Amino acid sequence: MSGILYEEPSIWLFLLVTVFLGGGAAWLSGRAIALTWRPYWQVLGYMLLLACAVRFLHYALFEGTLLTAQYYAVDLGVLCILGSIGFRLTRAKQMTSQYPWLYEPAGPFGWRDRRANG
């Protein structure tokens, strides 16, 4: 796997920087965007910037390559997934708690119209 998804000598460095540090920031960013009722596309814009910061951490702390499209795309993919999950979980909770007379929970990521169910 080394060379395809990450360039560090150990997968633990990739997990630490990209998944735990970057992913945690992505999750919180997605959550913050949902809490302020902003549209989903802003999550993607913030993840582009956050992926640059994660690449810089790889470069500055572990002597990784700063400007590489392959590893940037991997980091961006991980961050977009975690940011989207944070956004969607928060938005589903918002919709069902802010508008309980209109919507009911439909799993952790969704809601449904109460009037459609009778």
Image (cartoon, rainbow, N blue to C red):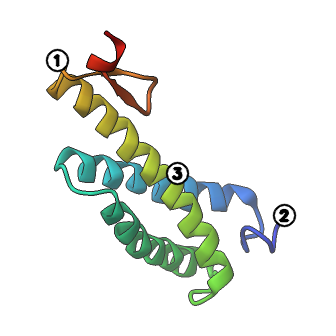
What residue is shown at x 41% (from left), y 70% (from top)?
50
Q: Which residue is mark 1?
A: 101
Q: Position of residue 11 (x, y in %)?
A: 73, 58
**Residue 9 visible here:** yes
Inspect the image, locate mark 1, and give the three-letter code of the amino acid beneath it. Trp
Q: Is residue 114 visible?
A: no
Query: In the image, which disc is placed on residue 68?
Result: none
Across and down, in percent, residue 34 comes to 26, 47
The answer to which image quadrant residue 97 occupies is top left
How many numbered marks are there?
3
Q: Which mark is residue 20?
A: 3
Q: Is residue 10 left or right of residue 27?
A: right
Front disc: 1 or 2: 1
Q: Decide which of tag 1 and tag 3 comes sooner along the chain.
A: 3
Determine whether 13 is above or below 54 in the image.
above
Q: Residues under labels 1 and 2: Cα distance?
A: 50 Å
Name the residue at 31% across, 65% down.
42
Q: Among all residues in the image, which is located at the extreme right?
A: 1
- Residue 13, percent across and down? 65, 61
Q: Residue furthest bottom?
A: 67
Q: Quadrant of the N terminus?
A: bottom right
Look at 44% across and 33% down and name the residue there.
109
Residue at image coords 69%, 55% = 12
- Residue 1 placement, left or right of 101: right
Secondary structure at numbered mark 2 = loop
- Residue type at mark 3 is Phe
Please give the residue where the numbered disc 2 appears in the rendered image: 1
